[in-house]
Amino acid sequence: MLGNRAVVVQRFDTENLDAGLALVTKLVPEAEPGHVVVHITLRPVHPTDLNIKRYSTWTSGSFTPGPEGFGIVHEVGEGVMGVVKGQRVVVFLTLENLPNGEGSWQEYVSVREDLIWVVPDSISDEDAAQFVIIPWTVHGMLSDLQVPKGEYVLQTAAGSVLGRQFIQLAKHWGIKTINVVRRAEQKDELKALGADEVICSTDEDVPARVKEITGGKLAYGAVDAVAGELTKQVTASVRDGGQVYIYGVLGGFDAIVGVGDLFRGVCVSAWFVYQELSFPARRQVFIDEVSKLIEDKIIVPTAGETYELADYQLALEKTGQVGRGGKVFLKN
């Protein structure tokens, strides 16, 4: 009889956020009508997964993290027409499964058929496993900013996996990037990737440099993964009436904004991929366009170290390291 190994959050410890994690064995789910049971073999560990405490807002019981994953179709339920047993698939768990505590950090999940994407042979397992959260966020934010060709867009945490894909897609679309990092040694690496300008926030005045780079126009818009104090520098670097999307909280759960920038009409709002995924038409746009960008090597996901599912603590530690390289994975 098959077992279903799963990492679960059994309790929420604010002092040690991963102390309540445990590896347990659950029942393998059955394929209900309209659902597909997928054997998950590879799943990414995202920086947001480090904040285990956030899951307490979704459930008071045990909780399995993981918003996405790659695997093989194990069983199909009645009425399923689009996939068959044995196919390579990506699962999107953010809409139905994750809020119910059933993420990808387990071996088997049951997912609605419309939340599965069949992976073409041209896309590797590693690229497919990180197909959703990062590239869809990059594509969605850059699309929504509507930056004209030749204009500058600013981003923070530019050395991250997401930041690198943002540079790649902006370059492909003819948009110039101003990239904010914390470590000066990242400058040459990002320039080689296609970054137009790189600013080190630890020893440079970000708004002053942006003004210099743009000849006083400032950036057309910006995306911010940090929040906290850095958001004030970001909003000061954006044109009158410009849009700033905050999509991460690396610097804390508060964002400081200058009142003067609000008077200039700078708009600051959150951009959350989970909300975007609730619209089937939006999901289909991401599937169609992002898959082609990955197949054509326009967006190139970067794979880092891979750990066994039982070594989830090591994977979390690696994900939290500065300059860790590519995406960390958990495999079976």
Image (cartoon, rainbow, N blue to C red):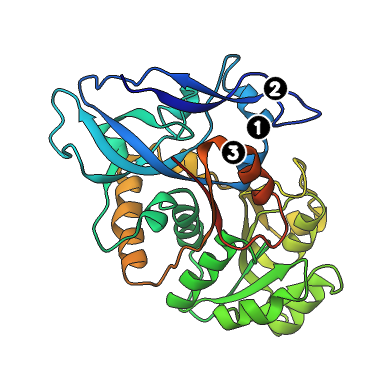
Q: Is residue 84 left or right of residue 177?
A: left
Q: Find the distance from the CA under tag 3 to the CA under tag 2.
A: 17 Å
Amino acid type indicated by mark 1: Ile
Residue denoted by label 1: 52
Judging by the rendered image, the residue that carries numbered circle 3 is 312
123 or 180, which lies in front?
Answer: 123
Amino acid type of the residue tagged 3 in the rendering? Tyr
Q: Are marks 1 and 2 in contact (CB under 8 Å)?
A: yes
Q: Could you tell me which residue is drawn at 71 percent across and 83 percent down?
A: 213
Q: Amino acid at mark 2?
A: Phe
Camera-side residue: 119 or 92? 119
Foreground label between 3 and 1? 3
**Quarter of the view holding residue 59:** top right
Please tell me whether mark 3 sits on a helix, a strand or a loop: helix
Give the CA distance from mark 1 to mark 2: 7 Å
Which residue is depicted at the point 47% across and 29% down?
A: 98
- Circle 2 SS class: loop
Q: Nearer the viewer, residue 322 or 245?
A: 322
Residue bearing mark 2: 12
User: Considering the numbered disc 1 on the image, is that residue within a helix, a strand or a loop?
Assistant: helix
- The spot of residue 223 in percent (x, y) is 62, 59
Q: Indicate the quadrant where residue 210 lies.
A: bottom right
Please name the residue shown 37% across and 72% down the image: 297
